[in-house]
Amino acid sequence: MIGFLGGLFGKGGSAVATPLLSLLGFPGFVAVASPLPATVPSTLVASAEYWRSKLLDWEIVGWSIGIGVPAIIAGSLLSPYVGAKPLLVVTGLLVLAFGVSFLFFPKDRSLAKEAVENPDGLRPSYWRIRLVLVSIGVGLISGLLANAGGFLLVPCYTELLKQPMKKAFACSLAVSSVLAVPGTIVHAHLGHISWPVTCLVALGAIPFSVLGARLAIKTRAAKLERWYGLALTALGIFFLFHL
């Protein structure tokens, strides 16, 4: 399920795996950090599906990685001073908030119209400043949450950079596959990762992430956005209720 939802919704799967591991009784930092290394191979194989469909915007990917890597390292180093419980609460609240946003305030229809009018790519005002701020903010929060950033990148790309849903998914997966690496190194050094848990997550996530990505590419964007909002809303409610 982690890999399938990750490929389907353009994220590494940590936002799904962390609540599930926490509910299974794993300690806070183990639940938060252990899924992170598994996102590297799963996001790479899912991203390849989007790349073949020509949905990647390499300018967005390049800037997000270049600025996001040092930001996620800084966030990871700060994580021991925040504590595991607040990180889990923040994860649940963010997942719920974004889910409600996509479910009740869909945007892809208007973005699709803008994309037709601007076939060379959507670039809102102060586009590069927006991209820099998104990369810094997502990097810091993802480092704190031991997350590759996918569940934050997708709504930021659609909300702030005005990207269509499928392109946001594609760019999110490509960026997440890289951002997961420095976060993994720092959290491994801090002793937050259970490698047996990581291996189990990866074994299931890798093949199913490809299936999820293929389904997303073939699905109408409006329907995909509703699925995305419903999945995040349900996950956020379930997670916060069981904390």
Image (tube, rainbow, N blue to C red):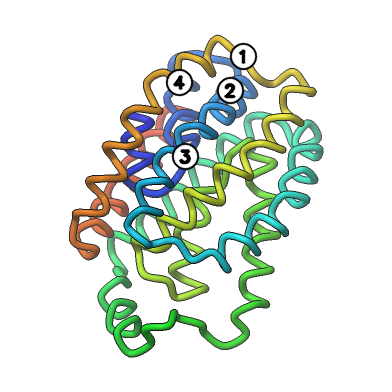
Residue that label 1 marks = 194
Q: Nearer the viewer, residue 198 or 104?
A: 198
Answer with left or right where residue 99 lies relative to residue 199.
left
Q: Is residue 179 visible?
A: yes
Q: Which mark is residue 43?
A: 3
Answer with left or right where residue 65 lies relative to residue 118.
right
Residue that label 2 marks = 34
Q: Which mark is residue 52?
A: none
N-term-proximal mark, 2 vs 3: 2
Q: Secondary structure at mark 4?
A: helix
N-term-proximal mark, 3 vs 4: 3
Residue type, numbered disc 4: Val
- Taking the spot 40% from the left edge, 49% from the top edge, the residue there is 10
N-term-proximal mark, 4 vs 1: 1
Residue that label 4 marks = 201
- Taking the spot 45% from the left edge, 14% from the top edge, the residue there is 200
**In the rendered picture of this protein, how many numbered marks are placed on residues?**
4
Answer with left or right where residue 155 lies relative to residue 136.
left
The percent position of residue 74, horizontal first and vertical second, equals: 80, 46
Image quadrant in which you'd find residue 16: top left
The percent position of residue 181, horizontal first and vertical second, equals: 66, 36
